[in-house]
Amino acid sequence: MLRSLLTFALLLTTLSGCVSSSKTQALWPSGKNAECQDTLASFYQKIDSTRTYALPYAQDERFPYLAFDRFSTSLVGEITSENQKSQWLSYVMQLGRQQLDTALTLSETKESSAISLQQCQALLAEETMDNAVFWQTLTSNPPVIETAYQHWKRVVGVYPISSLVAAGQIEDEQAHIMSGFDRPLDPVFRYGMSRKNHVDVSAIFKRARSVSELDWPVFDAKETEQLLDAFSPVISVETRSRDDLPGKLMISDDGKLAVDTATPTLYRASPIPAFKGVFSRS
């Protein structure tokens, strides 16, 4: 009798474990989306083993369709309401799209494969918003952005010692650099945005923060351009030779990267609109 009870208890425990495990796996991601997650993860693993370039954002292998910066990871502990979840997820999803687009371009992935990966990313994003398992996983074990900073070297004294050795050389180099600012540039090419219109930066930030659930400024397209116009530098370039001429990046006829000095161009990137995307809710 006792042996039968023990056998039954063991069988019940095993079945419970199977049910619990299957239920958890079915919650997130499930079905075709689980295959999509594996496909995206495999893609990034493959290019990580061969790429010689840096991708713009950090990733977490548990969420290969998303990407993170330090600002987004710092807010994980503050996400509580549905609107906050929607806004935060929209942002990291946009980072994920930029990350994937960059990786696809630099890895020269075939168009059919690229479309498949982009579709997988969209499917996973749709399932994520209302999935309790995702949010529980995220908050209990948030993504961590690795750093190359080695604290132990500072503790044992490598930093203080090396700073003493380099101090004199650094001061000499600073003096050398500063001396160049006292002479006139010859000749000078200036390019950049002119400051024709006054921008009320304080008012822009006040309005932008008022529409953010996480007190994170949300700029519309017009405000973004105004801020870029206000803070983008006007650059003066000393052009003593053709090597100093600014230009436009291009691909030459033989497929090599080149600079078109007949078209001076100032490149600037608009920040990702925080919390605007397919997850916004009324």
Image (cartoon, rainbow, N blue to C red):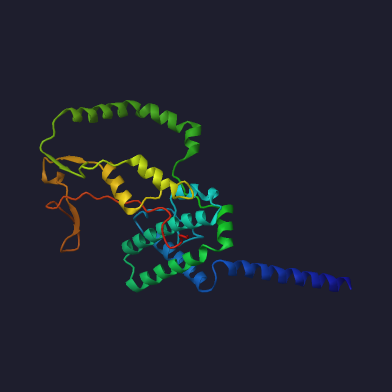
Locate residue 127, reporting x and y percent. Answer: 51, 67
Note whether 249 is above or below 13 in the view shown.
above
Q: Residue at x 48, y 48 (%)?
A: 214
Q: Is residue 249 above or below residue 176?
A: below
- Compare residues 157 and 32 and report the one nearer the observer: 32
Mark yes or no: residue 130 visible.
Answer: yes
- Which residue corresponds to the image point at 47% horizontal and 36% vertical from the top-left? 153
In the shown orientation, is residue 108 left or right of residue 4? left
Q: Nearer the viewer, residue 156 or 20?
A: 20
Residue closer to the observer: 185 or 233: 233
Which x, y percent locates residue 113? 37, 72
Q: Position of residue 23 (x, y in %)?
A: 63, 69
Q: Quadrant of residue 11?
A: bottom right
Residue appearing at x 11%, y 43% in the figure: 241
Can residue 49 be seen from the camera position used here?
no
Numbered-mark total:
0
The vertical placement of 170 against 32, above or below, is: above
**Which residue sits furthest right?**
1
* Residue 48 found in image quarter: bottom left
Q: Quadrant of the N terminus?
A: bottom right
Return the x and y of residue 5 as percentages of the image width and height: 84, 71
